[in-house]
Image (spheres, grey):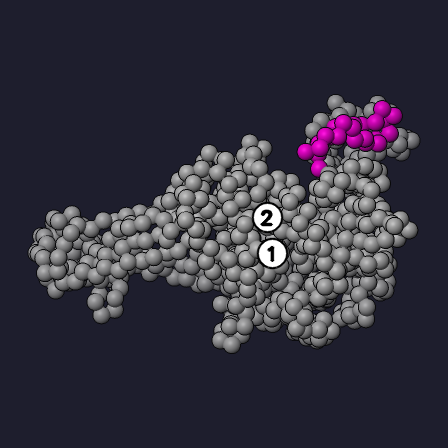
Amino acid sequence: MGKILVIAEKPSVARDIARVLGCKKENQKQGFLQGNDYIVSWAIGHLVTLAEPEDYDNKYKKWNMETLPILPEQMKLKVIKKTAPQLNILKKLMNSNEIDSLICATDSGREGELIFRYIYDIVKCKKPFQRLWISSMTDTAIKEGFSKLKDGNEYNNLYLSAKCRSEADWLVGMNATRAYTIQYHALLSIGRVQTPTLAIMTQRQKEINNFIPEDYYEVEAEYKQNFKGIWFDKKENQTKIKTLEQAKNIADKVMNQMGVITNIAKEQKKVPPPLLYDLTELQRDCNKKFGFSAQKTLTIAQELYEKRKMITYPRTDSRYLSDDMKKQISQILEKLYVVERYQKYVEKILSLPILPLGKRIIDNNKVTDHHAIIPTTKKINMDILTDNEKKVYNTIVIRFLSVFYEQYIYMITKITTEVEKEHFLSKGTTIIQKGWTELYQTLDMAVKRNKKEEIILPDLISGQQVNVIQSKWYKKKTQPPALYTENTLLSAMENAGRFVEDEILKEQMKDSGLGTPATRAAIIERLLTVGYIERKGQTLVPTEKGMKLIEIVPEELKSPQTTGKWEKGLSSIAKGNMTNEKFMASIQRYVHFLIEQSSHVNQNIAFEKEQRNTKKRIRKLGICPLCKKGTILEHSKGYYCSEWKNGCKFTIWKNSVKNYGVVLKESMIKKLLTERKIKSVAITLPQTGEKGIATLLLSNDNSGRLEMMDFTKN
């Protein structure tokens, strides 16, 4: 009987699985780990991608309107050159007579499924495979996952959904980018999700640009009985006063006068604990509290999941747990009890006669591919975490603990006072029960604590007389809408349906925003990379180029409605409620429409041409170590000796260490020429994807060849 080949998405995940399966024999050069029954290997993220237009026909090398639209009858795949060695290893293993069947152990989601299926397709493998579907990287979760393997064909719809997403993005992005770039003589990147996201931001920027601030005034009265009130118009129910004259008149009128309490209204408010985290909510909170970008939060969360094994799968869009997790909850609480800072709060939860596992925590109907992000049952060692990992982990723990706490209950008191026929409103807040907010006040690592402020009013009764001892007027200005931060932009992307006017479509889009929790961070980073938006402090601002792009594209391309419908369609494919053929037919019709629309050029809009620095100042970087006469200069592909005409062959090619993830800089070349080595260079091993540090050396033969030595894993 042959062996089973397990394919993970990353080397680190493969090693965890291999350890559990007893695959201890590792051949670093051959790129896999071996045991008696299993061989475990890995991808390094995507090893395969969709082919470029010129891979179909050379005529597509030149961007030309006559060749658009590009609509291949059958979408082709191609190998990503950088990671081709690992694909060749997988190809050999997958088609080996030693292997009887496979297990897909890539990330349990749409993109993870696509990574495996693209590999399976390009190597023309026909062997049966099963699917490992887990939400945690602990040994217990892995063992349980292997005991519940499912036939790979059960995930065919998920694969078709992922394939449609990939091909739709290619068709829309490739065709629209070429069409608008050609028509406007500027490189204009256009995407199925990035363009409507940009449109949301430019709309807000327009509102800010068009905003005209207006002055207004408020009047405050201070009473001898130790409380204050703000004047309000009883008919309009607002505190704004339009003119300074009116504000002064009111302030003068009530100064040192007697008033009477005309109404006291009390209302008790109850706020339940917030729901558990999905990825978008976690990214929003970490941006708000720590200023982390969405991508940074995702990267840290992925480390906590894969490397530390201290949280469950982070790329989830669910905020609930499933019924079968009830036992696990107690185990997680027991592990958290060991950490001193959580002890007091865990003890309170464990002392409850029964855990409050209501529908706000456990709801099978609201768990999608994965449940909410929570801590795992792994033994906790806070000392091994980086400061940023501690912040994200602590944020997840607080949210997890808070859901078992009581409601936050407070009393709002509103007192209306009449003075000389003018009305003043006083508001007070009294906390009755801190409930879950207590955890945020004491455990939150954010610099600005989440304090619940009390404004306590004196005990007063209706009809009681009060004395105005001071009255003041204040000049204020109306404020424009706020610029987007990553926190608020993520929220806008998640709730894109609110930007749609059609009520029926708005209702349909409740469950489908722009992108998915797993892709939103990358979309924001893409907009930054192509120069459509820029960061200013904690805010995100559209650039002139971004604003212009939204002016020239059709409404259908920038409307969240279009992308929202597609996300809903992709979800329907994954659930088996729509065919992939129907979805892709609609995409092809849309591409035809975009090409036609691009011909309606807006003559009023011109984009700045990308400036190319043709006259680059020549920098002398150091003495040539080979001929000792010339100096080292730079050209587009490398660093060379000025004596090359006289036969000196010294050359350092810029891409010589690219496969290690190292980009050579001028400062590095200078150091190599003087010291011959650079210590502690961050690298990624090309075959395994392992990250670490190494020493970069200039070889002793003085040819310009570079070497990596003394690799140490992170």
Whether residue 45 appears in magenta in the rendering, the answer is no
Whether pointer 1 and pointer 2 mark residues with C-beta atoms closer than 8 Å, the reply is yes
Front-most of 201 and 247?
Answer: 201
Identified by mark 1, the residue type is His
Q: Eyeballing the image, is 370 above or below 619?
A: below
**Does any portion of residue 177 appear in the rendered image?**
no
Q: Is residue 31 above or below residue 200?
A: above
Prevailing secondary structure class for the magenta stretch in the rendered image: strand
Residue 98 pos. (x, y %): 89, 48
Q: Is residue 656 above or below residue 673?
A: below
Amino acid of disc 2: Thr
Q: How many marks?
A: 2
Looking at the picture, tell me which residue is in the foreground, 264 or 138.
138
Position of residue 364 measured from the top left corner of the image (x, y, whole percent)? 55, 61
Quadrant placement of the C terminus: top right
SS at circle 2: loop
Whole-angstrom CA distance, mark 1 to mark 2, is 9 Å
Q: Could you classify mark 1 by the number of other residues whose Cα lies within 10 Å: few (under 14), some (14-19), or many (20 or more)? A: many
Displayed quadrant of residue 321: bottom right
Q: Earlier in the sequence, mark 1 or mark 2?
A: 2
Q: Is residue 235 visible?
A: yes
Which numbered tag is attached to residue 312? 2
Q: Which residues fall within the magenta stretch?
A: 691-714
Give how far across and how far down residue 665 sits, in percent: 71, 36
Graded by Cα atoms within 10 Å as few (under 14), some (14 to 19) or many (20 or more), the crowding at tag 2 reads many
> Which residue is pictured at 80% across the width and 65% down the height?
75
To which residue does mark 1 refer?
Answer: 370
